[in-house]
Amino acid sequence: MADIKSAVKYSTEMQQLIATKLVDVAFCYRDWSGDELEGLRHYIRCHYRSVQLGVCAYCKCNVSLHSAANCHVEHIAPKSKYRMFMFEPKNLCVICADCNSIKREQEVHQQEPDTISGQKERKRYPRAGSAFLIVHPHFDTYDDHIEIFGQFYVDKSDKGHFTIGACKLNRKMRMFGWDAAYDADIAAECAEYMDAKTPNDRSKALRAIRKKLAVL
């Protein structure tokens, strides 16, 4: 079952505002943060903060339950690439400040990865997770694609691998090294997992990691 079970629903007034923006040829993704959309952003943020139980869709760390500073509205299919999906309810979720900062920097430098696979010219939003390269909270179950050990993220699928890379989820390890984030024994088991050559070896390493975590 998908992580997000209820997409945001807009009022008639909100739908009218959205319609005026989408028909305005001058309106672009940079206008998302404009004052006119502040109320709509607040409404979207509150909805997804609640249905996501206060956790980031990508790293699963806590988002703020009150402040917008650590609870940002995310466009799963990038708004810089898919203007027509900017207000699509199933294209929205909330993420933490760190994940947002990484995604924003990519957007500014026009390096944000395309999360939709295949055909680029889409008139309708995809209706299944198979259309996406990233773990999609409205279609996918996070645990099917990514395993979290402490603050270390391990891919269990191609989607998991893409998501970890796109959001730089192992950022703490890259900045401070293994010892800053993990128990030494668990770090060693994670290294064994990363070095595993066969599915059987990977499975064995995962069981060892889970066993060590269970006694912490």
Image (tube, helix red, strand yellow):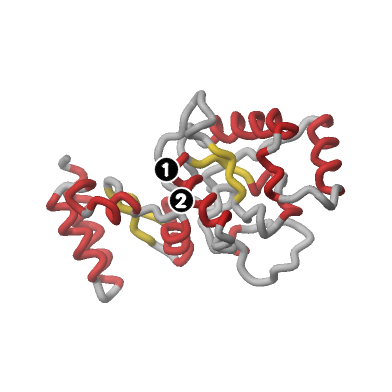
Let me know if residue 132 appears in the view: no
The residue most toward the front is 109
The residue most toward the left is 185
In the rendered view, does 172 fall on the left or right side of 123?
left
Of pointers 1 and 2, the one earlier in the residue sequence: 1
Residue 41 image point, x, y percent: 66, 34
Comparing 43 with 198, the one in front is: 43
| Local secondary structure at mark 2 | helix
Let me know if residue 7 appears in the view: yes
Sort mark 1 into few (<14), some (14-19) or many (20+) by Cα contacts within 10 Å: some
Identified by mark 2, the residue type is Tyr
In the rendered view, does 120 fall on the left or right side of 161?
right
Q: Residue at x 69, y 71 (%)?
A: 119
Comparing 62 with 173, the one in front is: 173
Label 1 and label 2: CA atoms lie apart by 9 Å
The image quadrant of residue 206 is bottom left
Work out whether 196 lies above or below 124: below
Residue at numbered disc 2:
142
- Badge count: 2
In this rendering, the label closer to the viewer, 1 or 2: 1
Sort mark 2 into few (<14), some (14-19) or many (20+) by Cα contacts within 10 Å: many
Work out whether 69 lies above or below 82: above
Residue 28 image point, x, y percent: 74, 50
Residue at numbered disc 1:
60
For the residues labelled 1 and 2, say whether their Cβ atoms are less than 8 Å apart.
yes
Q: Residue at x 23, y 57 (%)?
A: 207
| Local secondary structure at mark 1 | loop
Residue 135 image point, x, y percent: 51, 56
Identified by mark 1, the residue type is Lys
